[in-house]
Image (cartoon, rainbow, N blue to C red):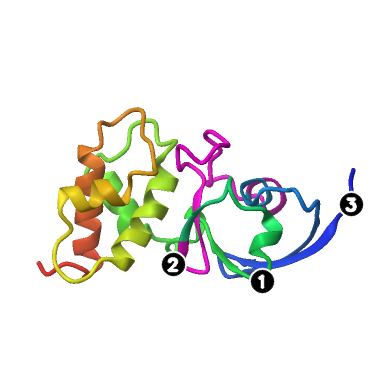
Amino acid sequence: MGTTVPLQMTVNGQAVDAEVEPRLLLVHFIRDTVGLTGTHIGCDTSNCGACTCHVDGESVKSCTLLAVQAAGSEVTTIEGMSGTGELHPLQEGFWAEHGLQCGYCTPGMIMAAADLIQRHGPGPLTDEEVRKGLEGNLCRCTGYQNIVKAVQAAAEAMGKVPA
């Protein structure tokens, strides 16, 4: 094993201290060190978005970030979306609107959609805005229409869109 460095960050509200190799990707830190496997590894090239999580409130592809680059940050994964034990409105929306099939891309889609909804101004999200906002996340199963409907339903449920 190579040289390690100390790393501290908060993951889903919990302080995490570890010794890591400086070259360890954040996605591997989340999965292998922290033990949260909802963040998926899909391509290792940042093309698919299955590894999307939030670092300090911003949507990032965790396969493009070294864990040490997130030192001191607040990291939120799909497991930390709700915090209440209930489904987050986006998780509920994907379930209710059939926005998933195999589910492999779903955690990354939900994390990217949460960032999209948070940044969106008042008014409904159009199909085009949702598709543009999720363009860095690939789904090989659904054809996207139900994903778009799921994000729009979640935005409304979150009070981001007037009913």
Residue 163 lies in quadrant: bottom left
Most common secondary structure along the magenta stretch:
loop
Name the outermost residue toward the left: 163
Tag 3 residue:
3
**Above or below — where is 40 with respect to 159?**
above
Tag 1 residue:
72
Element type at mark 2: loop
Q: Is residue 1 left or right of residue 150?
A: right
Q: Compute the Cα span from label 3 to label 1.
A: 20 Å
Q: Is residue 101 left or right of residue 111?
A: left
Whichever of labels 3 and 2 marks the residue nearer the N terminus, that label is 3
Q: Residue 15 location, x and y as percent?
A: 67, 70
| Type of the residue with mark 2 | Thr
Element type at mark 1: loop
**Above or below — where is 163 with respect to 130?**
below
Q: Compute the Cα span from label 3 to label 2.
A: 38 Å
Q: Residue 117 location, x and y as percent?
A: 29, 62
Whichever of labels 1 and 2 marks the residue nearer the N terminus, that label is 1
Q: Residue 76 location, x and y as percent?
A: 52, 62
Q: Is residue 122 magenta?
A: no
| Type of the residue with mark 1 | Gly
Name the outermost residue toward the top: 141
Residue 84 marker: 2
Q: Give 84 or 90, whichever is nearer the viewer.
A: 90
Whichever of labels 3 and 1 marks the residue nearer the N terminus, that label is 3
Q: Residue 105 location, x and y as percent?
A: 42, 39
Part of the protein shown in magenta: 31-58
Q: Is residue 1 left or right of residue 53?
A: right
Badge 2 crowding class, 10 Å Cα cut-off, few under 14, some 14 to 19, many 20 or more, is: few
Q: Is residue 52 magenta?
A: yes
For the residues bearing labels 3 and 2, Cβ distance under 8 angstroms? no
